[in-house]
Amino acid sequence: MSQANCSSQLLDKHCGPYAHSGSSVRKHMWQVCLALTPCTLFSLYLFGWPAIFLFFCTCLSALLFEALCLYMRKDPLVRVMDGSALLCAWILALTLPPWAPWWLGVGGAFFAIVVGKQLYGGLGQNIFNPAMLARTALLITFPMQMTTWVEPTPIVLSSSPDFFSALLISFSSATNIDAYSGATALGSLKTALSMGQNVEQGLAELYQPLYAFIGWSSGSMGESSELLILLGAVYLLWQRIISWEIPVAMLLGLFVFTQLSHILDGEHYAAASFHLFSGGVVLAAFFIATDPVSSPSSSLGRIVFGLGCALLIFIIRNWGSFPEAVAFAVLIMNAFNPLIERYLRPRIYGRLANKEALPNLASFELAQKLKRPKS
């Protein structure tokens, strides 16, 4: 056997990695889906059959678009089951109006999977969060359909549309949903302030913190229950699927910005509890902004990312044209992510904590610096 072959076999047998954590993309994606299940089931119960149809239309069409893109790129079709396309569509569906027509979910799934993900090179290559990219595109293109909300009508109540009525709502828009419509708390406050009213007048008889926390309020499916979203978030943190930096920085930053403004001018700026329990802030903090592809990799970078999201949400909600700002904030911070990574990059693998290059592995100095325990 030649010396070259011997060397090759030694490299094959002894090259790293020597240990595996057991984590994988598929496991990561399905665990996030599992964490989203409680709040999703409650939302489907709360908004009935039209929400169920929209959710399944969005998810199924995303899987079809993913399979089509994989086929055109000649990649293995089995990758469609890695859960990434399903999770992307799942999050997108949670950000849509519950009774939106089917084509809005399918169009959003197309934009998220084809434009937001596959055109960048597929899983792990996208710069922006695909679900937020799709939601923003839909909001700009179809503002009326994306801002038509309904009051909670649980599926067990007689006032909720039955199966066939829901088919007409979702697939033909034949039923007049104005009878069920209701404004969100964020939208009502924005309208009231623009008419010269103060915060108390704008939220009178509309916003109740307890109802907002448990999920009994108008809005998208992902806005329904902060309580169940937090339950899923605890699971993700326990499983170490996400880290604490972005959620804590985002929620704490928004709390500080909004509460300070409320203390300074309570007539024109709502309290922190209103901003935290209204809209999709909690969902975004744990399930959207923590996307490992489009968020920073260092701890300090993630804190900066979360604070940036909080600041942008505060600015857009108070002085922007749209009452909700989560999608815009996440996308803007996605754009800043390369800059954050450049200046707040984590310690380079193969270097010491002071960024000094590792010396020769056989050297005595390396053993001293690493302080390996004696065997």
Image (spheres, helix red, strand yellow):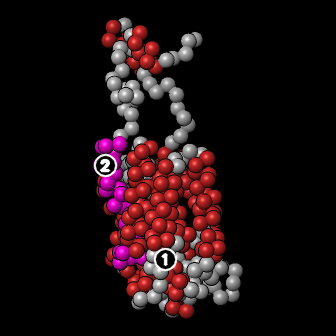
Seen from the viewer's position, the closer of residues 67 and 97 is: 97
Q: Residues within 10 Å of mark 2 (few under 14, many from 20)?
A: some
Please give the name of the residue rendered at 41% of the width and 66% of the height, measured from the top-left corner: 313
Residue 168: x percent and y percent? 52, 86
Q: Main secondary structure of the magenta part?
A: helix
Seen from the viewer's position, the closer of residues 307 and 146 is: 307
Q: Secondary structure at mark 1?
A: loop
Q: Secondary structure at mark 2?
A: helix
Above-or-below relation of 291 to 180? above
Q: Which residue is mark 2?
A: 338
The residue furthest front is 264
Please give the name of the residue rendered at 33% of the width and 48% of the height, measured from the top-left corner: 340
Above-or-below relation of 338 to 169? above
Q: Residues within 10 Å of mark 1 (few under 14, many from 20)?
A: some
Image position of 164 (left or right of 188) = right
Q: Quadrant of the N terminus?
A: top left
Q: Is residue 65 visible?
A: no
Q: Which residue is mark 1?
A: 266
- Give the image quarter of residue 114: bottom left
Residue 324: x percent and y percent? 43, 73
Seen from the viewer's position, the closer of residues 124 and 325 is: 325
Image position of 99 (left or right of 344) = right
Q: Amino acid at mark 1?
A: Gly
Residue 278: x percent and y percent? 53, 72
| Of pointers 2 and 1, the one earlier in the residue sequence | 1
Residue 127 marker: none
Seen from the viewer's position, the closer of residues 220 and 198 is: 198
- Find out whether residue 233 is within the magenta segment: no
How many numbered marks are there?
Answer: 2
Please give the name of the residue rendered at 61% of the width and 74% of the height, measured from the top-left corner: 209
Q: Which residues are magenta?
A: 319-344
